[in-house]
């Protein structure tokens, strides 16, 4: 797990370094809400709950409207269990993705669409009903670039869909907001 986190941070910093030509780094906080995972929610013991989400994004724009972004995020409590409440409470979640971005620049106001692939990795010492799983994500939002010097704001809403977990696919809603730091010409 530590190797995965170190590798992900390296990729994020690598992309941030390349963002000097035209790019952006964002630090965000938000909300992650896993959808229903049935099988009678693992025999009525597992409850996926909403949780805070913290992370960073590095975007590199290779054309005025197209870009690539790397996302890394952490969720401090991914799910609950009524069968084993003390065990599930320390299960954290790690999300990573690489996305394509379609920007629609209107001065400092930039609506955008994004989509990509990555993975969701729960970890902790307690109950974990699945290991790392492949996930796709899609969404969009608004960037308010360079409000004060290079500093701006960014608001995102994304949907995640995992590969099969316990024989079913898991849908997750992510809503975030944060500060952006923009470099280069835009």
Image: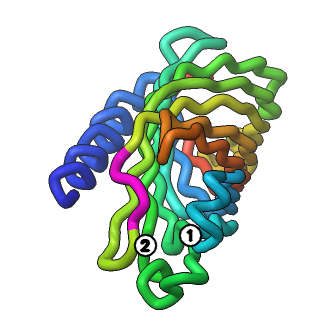
Tell how many labels: 2
Q: Please tell me which residue is depicted at 60% across the width and 24% down the height of the picture.
A: 115
Q: Is residue 183 visible?
A: no
Residue where numbered disc 1 is placed:
79
Question: Does the magenta run of residues contain 129?
Answer: yes
Q: Do the residues labelled 2 and 1 touch (CB within 8 Å)?
A: yes
Q: Quadrant of residue 127?
A: bottom left
Q: In this view, does 1 lie above or below 146?
A: below
Q: Tag on residue 60?
A: none
For the stretch drawn in magenta, the main secondary structure is loop
Q: Residue at x 77, y 18 (%)?
A: 104
18 or 91, which is in the foreground? Answer: 91
> In what quadrant of the picture does the C terminus appear?
top right
Magenta highlight range: 128-132
- Residue 138: where, in percent of width, then height? 66, 29
The N terminus is located in which quarter? bottom left
Cα distance, mark 2 to mark 1?
A: 7 Å
| Residue in front for this viewpoint, 20 or 68 | 68
* Location of residue 144 with respect to 104 vertically, above or below: below
Q: Is residue 42 magenta?
A: no
Identify the image quadrant of residue 144. top right
> Which one is nearer the viewer's eye here, 25 or 76?
76
* Tag of residue 91: 2
User: Residue 126, image x and y in percent?
Assistant: 36, 78
């Amino acid at each position: 797990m530590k190797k995965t986190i170190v590798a992900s941070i390296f990729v994020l910093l690598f992309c941030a370094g390349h963002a000097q030509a035209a790019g952006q780094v964002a630090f965000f906080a938000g909300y992650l809400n896993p959808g229903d995972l049935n099988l009678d929610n693992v025999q009525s013991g597992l409850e996926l709950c909403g949780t805070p989400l913290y992370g960073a994004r590095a975007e590199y724009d290779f054309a005025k409207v197209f870009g690539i972004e790397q996302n890394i995020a952490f969720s401090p409590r991914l799910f609950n269990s009524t069968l084993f409440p003390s065990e599930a409470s320390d299960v954290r979640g790690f999300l990573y993705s690489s996305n394509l971005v379609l920007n629609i620049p209107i001065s400092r106001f930039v609506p955008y669409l994004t989509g990509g692939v990555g993975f969701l990795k729960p970890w902790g010492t307690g109950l974990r009903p699945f290991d790392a799983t492949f996930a796709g994500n899609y969404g969009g939002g608004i960037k308010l670039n360079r409000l004060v010097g290079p500093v701006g704001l960014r608001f995102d809403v994304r949907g995640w869909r995992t590969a099969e977990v316990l024989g079913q696919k898991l849908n997750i809603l992510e809503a975030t907001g944060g500060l952006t730091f923009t470099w280069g010409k835009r």
